[in-house]
Image (spheres, rainbow, N blue to C red):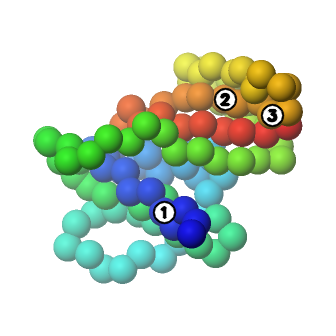
Amino acid sequence: MRLDHVTIRTDDLEASTAFYRDIIGLEVGPRPNFSFDGAWLYHEGRAVVHLKCPAATTIDGALEHVAFSTGAFDEVVEVIQARNIEHTVRALPDGSLRQCFLRDPNGARAEITGC
């Protein structure tokens, strides 16, 4: 089994798309012609984040966080800092990886992990 995709409800498609494109580094790609607005963002040819509009007023599940791994951790954190996005950086107890936690425009928690 592997993670296929994460669907995130949003009332601000433009801001959410920009976050996952410009901060996380995903690419906007093709999406089926659904009856609702949204966007699909891709990594290595796979649609891994699905954005769906409008956000529902009730949520039928909880999203703890979405995790992304990068080989360019410092560069990603620099982009986050340059945009004044609130975030927390910490290392795993064994020091093997660093983690950066932040929230997307919808309040969903994102983790970026790297060396």
Q: Element at badge 2?
A: strand
Q: Residues within 10 Å of mark 2 (few under 14, many from 20)?
A: many
Q: Element at badge 1?
A: loop
Residue corresponding to mark 1:
5
Counting residues from the start of the chain, the first of labels 1 and 2 encountered is: 1
Q: Residues within 10 Å of mark 3 (few under 14, many from 20)?
A: few
Q: In the image shown, does 34 or 6 lie closer to the viewer?
A: 6
Q: Position of residue 2 (x, y in %)?
A: 58, 66
Residue corresponding to mark 3:
97
Residue corresponding to mark 2:
100
Which amino acid lies under the numbered mark 2 shown in the image of this protein? Cys
Q: Is residue 76 visible?
A: yes
Q: Nearer the viewer, mark 3 or mark 1?
A: 3
Q: In the image shown, does 7 or 29 lie closer to the viewer?
A: 7
Q: Quadrant of the C terminus?
A: top right
Q: Position of residue 20 (x, y in %)?
A: 55, 49
Q: Residues within 10 Å of mark 1 (few under 14, many from 20)?
A: some
* Distance between the alpha carbons at the discs numbered 3 and 1: 23 Å
Q: Quadrant of the N terminus?
A: bottom right
Which amino acid lies under the numbered mark 1 shown in the image of this protein? His
Q: In the image shown, does 14 or 93 lie closer to the viewer?
A: 93
Q: Element at badge 3?
A: loop
Q: Is residue 42 visible?
A: no
Q: Is residue 9 above or below residue 76?
A: below
From the viewer's perspective, tell me whether residue 78 is left or right of residue 25.
right
